[in-house]
Amino acid sequence: MAIIPQQRLFGWREIDELGDLERLALVLRHLPDEELMCKLERERAKGRNDYPIRAVWNSVVAGVVFQHPSIESLRRELARNAQLRDICGFDPCLGERAVPPAYVYSRFLGKLMWYSGEIERMFDRLVEKVSTLLPDFGRVLAMDSKPINSLARGRKKDEEEKPRKPDGRRDTDADFGKKTYRGRRKDGTLWEKVVSWFGYKLHLIVDAVYELPVSFSVTKASASDIQEGHQLIARLEEQQPEIIERCEVLTADKGYDDTKLIVNLWDEHQIKPVIDIRDMWRDGEDTRLLTGKDNIVYDCRGTVYCYCPETNKRREMAFGGFEKGRETLKYRCPARHYGVECQGMERCPAACGVRVPLAEDRRIFTPLARSSYKWKRTYKKRTAVERVNARLDEAFGFEKHFIRGLQKMKLCCALALTIMLAMAVGRIQEKQGMNMRSLVKAA
């Protein structure tokens, strides 16, 4: 066997910054959980206190920070790691006997589900704190939904009509969701891909620059993205009005392509919607004639074209900007703007430019023109929400989980997103802003 030389004895608190445990200490310092703890302690009152509420709560937070996939995994770590027990607040004199049994955690999580509103309020307070620390937080938002698979077996067709009672083992709340992706290959052929899953759906609004959550909701897998998008905007307006006032752009994929949502964002909140569009023209037309113009047309993606009165040649008009006071998009003559030779420019009614009102088609014409380069650059920021989803899968364990039931899923999502924000607040305040999005890097 390898002989280990005698080493100097020292206390674990002498280790520089507690090493990996400093991440947990950082989160615990910045979680606004005092109100929740007081309510839980008042409810317990003079009952047995074999396992203190604050210590059990801190250990649940530790399970998220250290990526434990199950309560049993967390309990094994607590039994092994005296330093972790001490940080969580368990009695050091009891040693391994201080670790709560599994049923204590089951009951505690059940109790937390009754107080899920308190955890959501913690989330909102942390969003306010981040917006104070980062003056441009919320200026560009991104919205998307994330499927969360359940490891439970989905119902068969002959079981769908049978009532199911929750028993803690089966997932009686989950259902099937489906997303369809369509596109066109380089050779012009169409492709379609259908993705289905059994479980739930997490709807997220995140800051597209800092990649931190701003608002969220959890539903069954079959819930509509568009309907939840409306509710998320309404909740954000109610809970975080300063974010709504600060926001300039909201970007989302074509799953949120909805006229009411686009109109609401601009007319009610002056937020420019950068939402991809679906080709829903079913009449076979590639372009439509602009109202009141004889030689100006537009396609389903908002690109405006003019036809030369002499040669009938079609050219794309140059985007000239958005006129907020008039609620119009200005387009310029391509011959004048690009220096292209046009034989009919002298008698073309569009030679001096054309104004397209948003009212022409509110879904196609938006304050940030879909045909502009700025729209394409801004739309790329939508990938921020996908990176947040990836961190939830990899760092927070939602790719493979053992969660059953909608209420417990809501609790676990709220807890994970709250800890994500608490970590960001802690790193910003303690001059570690470069790692604000990381759950795994040591302080």
Image: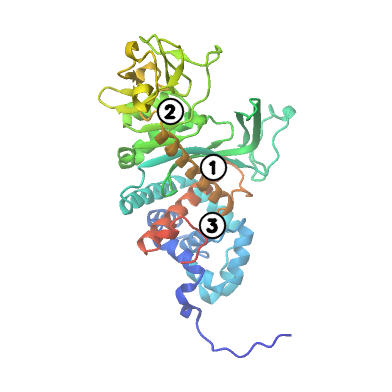
Residue extending farthest bottom? 6
Quadrant where the image shows the N terminus: bottom right
Q: CA distance from mark 2 to mark 1?
A: 43 Å
Mark 2 / mark 3, whichever is N-terminal: 3
Indicate which disc residue 371 carries: 2
Quarter of the figure with residue 328: top left
Residue type of the residue flagged with mark 2: Ser
Measured as percent of width and height from the top left, residue 97 is found at 59, 71
Whether residue 160 appears in this view of the structure is yes
Residue 406 vertical placement versus 163 (above, below): below
Near mark 3 (Cα within 10 A), the count class, few <14, some 14-19 or many ≥20, is many
Residue name at image x 43 percent, y 28 percent = 371
Residue 407 vertical placement versus 234 (above, below): below
Measured as percent of width and height from the top left, residue 36 is found at 41, 53
Q: CA distance from mark 2 to mark 3?
A: 44 Å
Is label 3 in a helix, a strand or a loop?
A: helix
Mark 1 / mark 3, whichever is N-terminal: 3
* Residue for badge 1: 407
Mark 2 / mark 1, whichever is N-terminal: 2
* Residue for badge 3: 64
Residue type of the residue flagged with mark 3: Val
Is label 1 in a helix, a strand or a loop?
A: helix
Residue 412 vertical placement versus 251 (above, below): below
Q: Relative to 96, is 339 on the left or the right?
A: left
Residue name at image x 45 percent, y 35 percent = 376
Indicate which disc residue 83 carries: none
Tag in front: 2 or 3: 2
Residue type of the residue flagged with mark 1: Gln
Near mark 1 (Cα within 10 A), the count class, few <14, some 14-19 or many ≥20, is some
Quarter of the figure with residue 347: top left
Residue name at image x 48 percent, y 69 percent = 87
